Amino acid sequence: MLGHLIRYSLRRLAVRWLTTLLTTLGIGIGVANIVALISVSEIARAQAMRLMGELGANTIFVTPYFSFEESPFEQAGAGMGALPVSYYEFLRDKPYAEVVSPFQALVAFVAHKGNRVFTTVIGCTPDIFKVRPYKLASGRFYSDDETAGASEVAVLGHTVAQKLFPEGRAVGQEIVLKGKRLRVVGTLEEKGRIGFEDFDNRIFIPLNLAQKLFDYPYLHTVAIKHPEGMKTEDVVKQIKQELAQWRGVDPEKQDEFSVFSMKELTRAANETFKIFAVVLLGVSCIALLVAGIGIMTVMLMSVVEQTREIGVRRAVGARRRDILVQFFIETLLQVVAGQVVGFILGAVGVYILCAHADWTFFITGKTIILALGFSFGVGIVFSILPAFRAATLDPVESLRYE
């Protein structure tokens, strides 16, 4: 009996193939949205956690004041802050500071012959390469002496090196930054990207040179690595107290600087990605709900079209349950087809994005269950009204329907 109802439902769907196609596509788009958006969020999160993990749990950052509790939009409205170089000078000789790396991040065009790239310029000391796990692809890092003398040298990120020197020979060549010719002494291995942030679209130049070229005598961050034997939370607390005492401010109420560990940064990033995933899921669910309303509308029209036929079937012995099951089967066939189409579209979209961004492609089982489960639920819920309306039609009245 069930097999007969499935075959009958398939014939009915084939007869009205256009509405079947549109309904299936509606479900498919909703499923594709969930698969693509949630997967991209999870992949970006994994990429971010990987890059943060490479910095090490014993890394601490001192930055202009920033609060994880306050709205980032409110803080962005105040503009990007800066630290005097004296922060670095105060921290560099502390016993808990195994490595201290001050740096500023600015943006500018760099050029080589006919090639030109808009990039992030990191002005820093060579210690940044001890704090951040950058690896050389060729050449060398610049030295402390070159930093002190504001030598016109640069280390290029992978993307910048490829765009400026497509032939692949960057070391020993010259680039132009802010009207100055800088000699390339090294290039870096590929690091990857998070969202629109390309961590390879960077160049590194001596801090003193950056301050001179950009006329910007400030820092954006001082990164500190403490010895492995120390507890990170204790070091963070000590830095806060010492900086507050040095600056003559209350450590609990000041708004001059922030001190946070990699653990805090990772936790804040995790929370941000969770909120982002919930928002994306909500957007995707709206698309599925719209598709569900479309299913209900189409199935109600189908009830009207089949009114006389339903009356005939009831007159020759079909039960209400048979009519009810038939309409549920029609809906489920469209939902399943939409799920297959949607999953394929979503997976292909994620794969293309990962290939472009050089991310590791994966789709979690949780995402698949969420997409298929929610779409299945939407299909069932929105088919209840048409199915019950068809099943409760009066056979005599149905036979009279024209």
Image: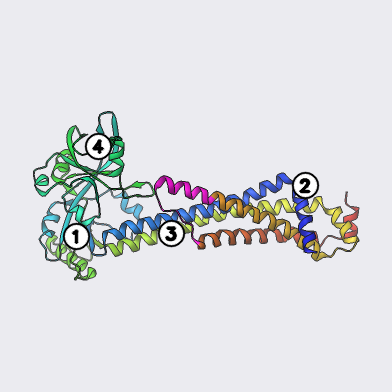
Q: Residues within 10 Å of mark 4 (few under 14, many from 20)?
A: few
**Which amino acid does the dot numbered 4 rest on?**
Arg
Q: Disc 3 versus disc 1: distance between alpha carbons?
A: 30 Å
Q: Secondary structure at mark 3?
A: helix
Q: Which residues are magenta?
A: 346-364
Q: Disc 3 versus disc 2: distance between alpha carbons?
A: 44 Å
Q: Is residue 318 left or right of residue 279?
A: right
Name the residue at 54% across, 60% down: 368
Counting residues from the N terminus, which is met first, the one under dot 4 or under dot 3?
4
Q: Nearer the viewer, residue 325 or 389?
A: 325
**Residue carrying label 2:** 15
The answer, for residue 250, to whether it is visible in the render is no
Residue 299, percent from left and from top: 73, 53
Q: Which mark is residue 275?
A: 3
Q: Which mark is residue 161?
A: none
Q: Which mark is residue 169?
A: 4
Q: Secondary structure at mark 1?
A: strand
Counting residues from the N terminus, which is met first, the one under dot 3 or under dot 1?
1
Pointers 2 and 4 in contact (CB under 8 A)? Answer: no
Q: Disc 1 versus disc 4: distance between alpha carbons?
A: 34 Å
- Disc nearest the viewer among 1 and 4: 4
**Which amino acid does the dot numbered 3 rest on?**
Ile
Magenta span includes 123? no
Pointers 3 and 1 in contact (CB under 8 A)? Answer: no
Name the residue at 71% across, 61% down: 384
**Which amino acid does the dot numbered 1 rest on?**
Ile
Q: Which mark is residue 224?
A: 1
Which image quarter holds the N terminus? bottom right
**Which amino acid does the dot numbered 2 rest on?**
Val
Magenta span includes 360? yes
